[in-house]
Image (cartoon, helix red, strand yellow):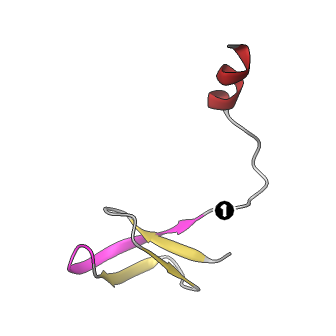
Amino acid sequence: MNAVACKECGYSFEDKEPGKYYCPNCSKEMKFMKIEAFCGAKPGELNETDKKK
């Protein structure tokens, strides 16, 4: 999955590279960051604390 999301509101586009794009939610050109999904990362501390309960 290759997608980017607006740094302010989270609006996303698919098949784009990180950079500046017009965001319809913010009504101006905003910086869009790469979304990392299904990257193989392991669960963090949040999951580990749930298991202790």
Q: Position of residue 3 (x, y in %)?
A: 57, 76
Q: Residue most toward the front? A: 53
Q: Magenta stretch: residue 31 in it?
A: yes
What residue span does the magenta drawing correspond to? 25-35
* Magenta part, dominant SS: strand
Q: Position of residue 44 (x, y in %)?
A: 68, 34
| Disc 1: which residue | 37
What residue is at 37 percent from the left and 80 percent from the top? 20
What residue is at 32 percent from the left and 63 percent from the top? 9
What residue is at 42 percent from the left and 72 percent from the top? 32
Look at the picture and state if 38 lies above or below 51: below
Quadrant location of the C terminus in the rendered image: top right
Q: Position of residue 39 (x, y in %)?
A: 74, 59
Relative horizontal placement of residue 30, taking residue 46 as reference (left or right): left
Q: Position of residue 25 (x, y in %)?
A: 27, 74
Q: Residue most toward the left? A: 27
Relative horizontal placement of residue 14, taking residue 49 as reference (left or right): left
Neighbours of disc 1 within 10 Å: few (<14), some (14-19), many (20+): few
Element under label 1? loop
Relative horizontal placement of residue 12, taking residue 52 as reference (left or right): left
What residue is at 79 percent from the left and 54 percent from the top? 40
Quadrant location of the N terminus in the rendered image: bottom right
- Amino acid of disc 1: Ala
Q: Magenta stretch: residue 24 in it?
A: no
